[in-house]
């Protein structure tokens, strides 16, 4: 078992050493001007090749009076734009809903305030009436005393 | 039987069982609460919510399932267990119909709409919610940063995970994505959307020995069931990449990689300048130590330009590996459930 462990450990150590040396090598390659230039050229070539291939296919499909991939994409774009417009309408409806909710809340608050104010006015009027009653009765009792005198 | 022989047999049996095809990812139950074109808003409800919901903006170039890989390594599941309701913005699979959509469509229109729908939905659960928390991963975080800076009233706290901001500090990737080396105009003019396969192979070539390391790990650890499950799930996710909408990619590469405009300014997106100093909410930037796609310096760069308070954390792991660590959900939960005013 001891020897087996050693072999396993040795394999791991060897791998890690190999990985380290390869990493150093790759670092040199992947940042070299030649590699970077090649990478850019390769991507540019892929882009150009794909473009000319798609143009060729589109032309062939057009010559056959068949809808091309470009036509299908155009249709999908229109559908996508329409969906976006619908979502904008949904945004507006939700925003109007919010505004209506706020108005409803404000209206309810205003109603409660008005009812409370009305109660307060009634209470004040009641108090004034009571005072007036007291003044009136005081005046009346004053008149009665005068008459007696 | 020798250890070496046993490993050979385990690795062979594992790979022969076609583990990637049978791997299941993104299995946490959830509901789709809004749709806009290819984009969907997914809602994951916790058993008991302890804080306001968090909206996650995933990268456009992969599926959202990396944060819900397996039940044992699900960042979303972990956040739910900590009482954080989660909304995930899943960008879907844009087809050729999306190739002419500008970047502002994705940042202003789509993110704006998804945050609006998430907030509306969150208010059906808790009427007192006024702002949401947000997390952005990778390029999803880059876009989210721009959106939050332009809409300071929407987000309470923002966390960025491996999201590049200072693109000229992206190491080898910034050398490759230089105007002299990367003919982005030719690529987009010819290819339409930028193909996921090209993106995937570029990332693999950034660190070529990563591929060798991956297979060596299979040989070394194929006897471990937990490793087998995670490896197969990760492969399944990584093989399922998504094309980047063409015009949006052109603008992203030119403004971010060529001009480094997130740091230097001068980027007019959809008619409005991008100005990260206008971002005011507290921000947590999490970098992965061995990230070869969003190098720690490019992530931490946000602290030089963000208008609000910034906290930075560098964790163990790589760009993808950080997603399956237990430290990530723990740090995020601490940030969102912390002592800041609710």
Image: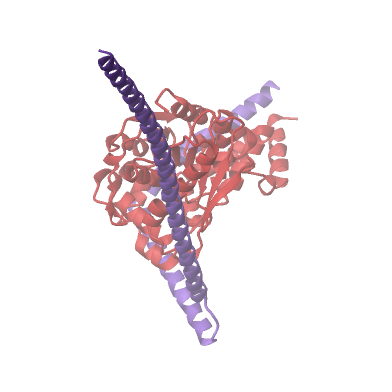
- Where residue B27 appears, as percent x and y from the top left, is 64, 42
Residue B46 placement: quadrant: top right
What residue sits 36% from the left and 55% below the top?
B104
The picture's colour for chain B is: red
Quadrant of the image containing the C terminus of chain B: top left
From the viewer's side, name the closer residue of B55 and B64.
B55
**Colouring used for the render:** by chain
> Residue placed farthest to the top in the image?
A149
Quick one: which chain is purple? A
Q: Position of residue A105 (x, y in %)?
A: 43, 43
Percent position of residue A80, x then y: 48, 65
Q: Quadrant of the N terminus of chain B?
A: top right
Number of on-image labels: 0
Q: Name the outermost residue toward the front.
A: A148
Q: Is residue A146 above or below residue B238?
A: above
Residue at point 60%, 40% (across, down): B69
Residue B316, x across and y down, in percent: 47, 29
- Decide which of B268, A92 is in the foreground and name it: A92
Residue nearest the observer in this picture, B318 or A87: A87
């Amino acid at each position: 078992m001891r020897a087996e462990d050693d072999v396993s450990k040795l394999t791991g150590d060897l791998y890690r050493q190999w990985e380290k040396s390869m990493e150093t090598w790759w670092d040199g390659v992947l940042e070299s001007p030649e590699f970077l230039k090649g990478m850019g050229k390769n991507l540019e070539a892929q882009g150009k090749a794909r473009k000319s291939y798609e143009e060729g296919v589109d032309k062939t499909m057009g010559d056959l009076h068949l809808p091309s991939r470009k036509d299908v994409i155009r249709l999908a774009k229109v559908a996508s734009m329409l969906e976006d417009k619908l979502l904008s309408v949904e945004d507006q409806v939700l925003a109007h809903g919010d505004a209506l909710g706020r108005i409803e809340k404000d209206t309810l608050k205003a109603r409660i305030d008005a009812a409370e104010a009305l109660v307060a006015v009634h209470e004040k009027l009641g108090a004034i009436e009571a005072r007036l009653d007291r003044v009136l009765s005081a005046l009346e009792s004053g008149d009665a005393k005068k008459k007696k005198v | 039987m020798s250890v070496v022989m046993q490993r050979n047999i385990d690795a062979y049996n594992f790979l022969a069982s076609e583990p990637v095809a049978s791997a299941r990812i993104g299995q946490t139950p959830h509901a789709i609460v809004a749709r806009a074109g290819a984009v969907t808003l997914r809602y994951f409800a916790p058993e008991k919510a302890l804080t306001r919901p968090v909206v996650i903006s995933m990268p456009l170039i992969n599926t959202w399932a990396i944060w819900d890989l397996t039940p044992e390594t699900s960042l979303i599941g972990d956040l739910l267990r900590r009482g954080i309701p989660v909304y995930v913005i899943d960008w879907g699979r844009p087809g050729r119909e999306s190739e002419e959509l500008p970047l502002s469509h994705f940042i202003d229109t789509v993110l704006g709409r998804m945050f609006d729908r998430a907030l509306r939905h969150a208010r059906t659960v808790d009427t007192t919610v006024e702002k949401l928390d947000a997390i952005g991963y990778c390029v999803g975080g880059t876009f989210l940063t721009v959106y939050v800076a332009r809409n300071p009233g929407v987000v309470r706290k923002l966390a960025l995970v491996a999201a590049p901001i200072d693109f000229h500090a992206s190491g080898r990737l910034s050398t490759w994505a230089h105007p002299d080396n990367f003919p982005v105009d030719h690529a987009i003019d010819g290819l339409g959307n930028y193909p996921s396969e090209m993106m995937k192979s570029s990332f693999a070539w950034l660190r070529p020995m990563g591929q060798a390391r991956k297979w060596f790990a299979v040989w070394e650890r194929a006897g471990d069931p937990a490793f087998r499950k995670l490896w197969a799930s990760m492969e399944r996710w990584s093989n399922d990449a998504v094309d980047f909408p063409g015009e949006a990619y052109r603008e992203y590469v030119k403004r971010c990689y060529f001009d480094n405009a997130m740091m230097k300014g001068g980027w007019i997106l959809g008619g409005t300048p991008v100005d990260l100093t206008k971002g005011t909410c507290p921000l947590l930037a999490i970098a992965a130590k061995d990230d070869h796609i969003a190098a720690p310096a490019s992530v931490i760069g946000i602290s030089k330009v963000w208008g609000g308070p910034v906290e930075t954390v560098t964790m163990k792991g790589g760009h993808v590996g950080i997603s399956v660590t237990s430290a990530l959900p723990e740090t995020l939960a601490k940030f969102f459930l912390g002592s800041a005013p609710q």
